[in-house]
Amino acid sequence: MEPIYKSTRSKNIQASPKQAVLKGIAQDGGLFVFDDLDQIQIDLNKICSQSYLENAQYILSGLLPDYTQEELKECVENAYGNSFASDAVTPLVKVGDQYVLELFHGPTSAFKDVALTLLPQLMSQALKDTDEKALILTATSGDTGKAALSGFQDVKNTGICVFYPNGKVSNIQYRQMACQQGSNVHVYAVEGNFDDAQSMVKKLFLDKELNEFAAKNKVRLSSANSINIGRLVPQIVYYFEAYKQLVKDGVIQIGDEVSFSVPTGNFGDVLAGYYASLMGLPVKKFYVASNSNSVLSDFFETGTYDRNRPFVQTISPSMDILISSNLERLLYYMSGKDADQVAAWMKDLAQKGVYSVGDEMKKKLQETFGWGYFDDAATKEIIAEVYDKTGYVLDPHSAIGYGLGKEADGVVVTLATASPYKFSRDVLSALKEEEKDEWKALHRIEELSKTRAPKALADLETAEILHTDILQPEEMKEAVMTVTGEMK
Ligand SMILES: *Cc1c(COP(=O)(O)O)cnc(C)c1O
């Protein structure tokens, strides 16, 4: 198999799709990109006549050609066959003037499940060609850790260690992780805040003794973060699925353009949509919706990316991000695949926290993307307004997408990235009710929305706690060494 992925920062660094999935990031710090995306043209007629699983296999086979059809079929079935609460996997519902694509019917009730159920399968298949196993190390502020645990649970040739800040995650998030089942999962509370755990994980990836010990045991230390191509690719599928649903419902005909509004943090989700458009999906515009950490929305407005600003904690915490890593891939394509230019911008970002792309590029970006941001008060207003008008309850992240979606004309699909039940106290407060207890808030939302809370969330209230280890940051290495030693 010819290597077809290249680094965004250097044409000379290449990898096969399987290698790219196992490596995650290129050795020069760049992200793996597929140059000839526009040569994979997806047949919309075919999309409209196939199931989600068939479409996933079809789209993946274009982007990951060194996986056999049988391998991809197995990956897709393991990922989506019975872990999503909706047969459609990502159902589309009409809410007011917009269509809402519900991406939250997976095991942890948030959109990261769509990718984090498939990535472990892709890794496990790629590992079959090697004599290695993979150990995933993840620090989490709450949500990603659980989605990763659930995705890697009992996946062959893999193990996972998740570290969260002790006492600094919500009660639901704590129980989601502490009650996680699986023979290959390890969960630790770490004293300190998220950054302490995060910087220790980064140190561990570079730790000489640990890496030598892992190599001796044929264990590859790996991260499952959102720059891995194996997380991006699964997200392309649901853009085509939304389109299929609109055609089926008679809202559009094949060939018509639609717009997508996407609540954004690391720019992975909206980038997947951009990939879909390069692969033939008729898109009018993408709307990049931010919270008060408006670094992206300011970028599209001014052409300058400037992370030198205060970090704001919001009620949409999964979008509280100042460095949107996946934007680098967009810059690569938009600059005409100019790796040297991308490398220069990323160097500026690392050294000065700021870079500017110039007027010509800014103009190009503004033709394809709309932008905007909403602070917490505005977000709550959107939740209240949509509920009053339609009876539908949005979570704070999805509400931000919905708010910006109002600016689009024509058919617009807003990506709903989390279930309102995951953020029930803030959602209730937006609906002018205060409730401190998360479980009571969850049950109250059931009454207000006339829907049922996802079973996995509701069951947590009484689930058995399986993980109780509390570590100091400096004890994390020993914990990982122990797990590595047991993976042989
Ligand atoms: C991660 C996340 C986002 C942001 O997605 P990106 O791909 O990082 O832009 C939005 N909403 C929720 C609920 C998330 O978990």
Image: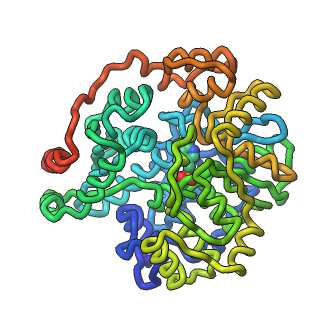
Relative horizontal placement of residue 214, taking residue 349 as reference (left or right): left
> How many marks on residues?
0
Residue 357: horizontal and vertical position, in percent?
62, 77
Relative horizontal placement of residue 379, taking residue 138 as reference (left or right): right
Quadrant (top left/top right/bottom left/bottom right) for the N terminus:
bottom left
Residue 427: horizontal and vertical position, in percent?
62, 28
Residue 58: name its quadrant. Answer: bottom right
Residue 173: name its quadrant. Answer: top left
Residue 4 appears in the rendering: no
Residue 432: name its quadrant. Answer: top right
Relative horizontal placement of residue 226, taking residue 448 as reference (left or right): left
130 and 463: which one is in front? Answer: 463
Q: Residue at x 49, y 81 (%)?
A: 344
Residue 132: horizontal and vertical position, in percent?
24, 59
387 and 118: which one is in front? Answer: 387
Q: Residue at x 55, y 41 (%)?
A: 314
Relative horizontal placement of residue 456, taking residue 482 as reference (left or right): right
140 and 452: which one is in front? Answer: 140
Residue 44 appears in the rendering: yes
Q: Residue at x 61, y 41 (%)?
A: 397
Residue 459: horizontal and vertical position, in percent?
45, 19
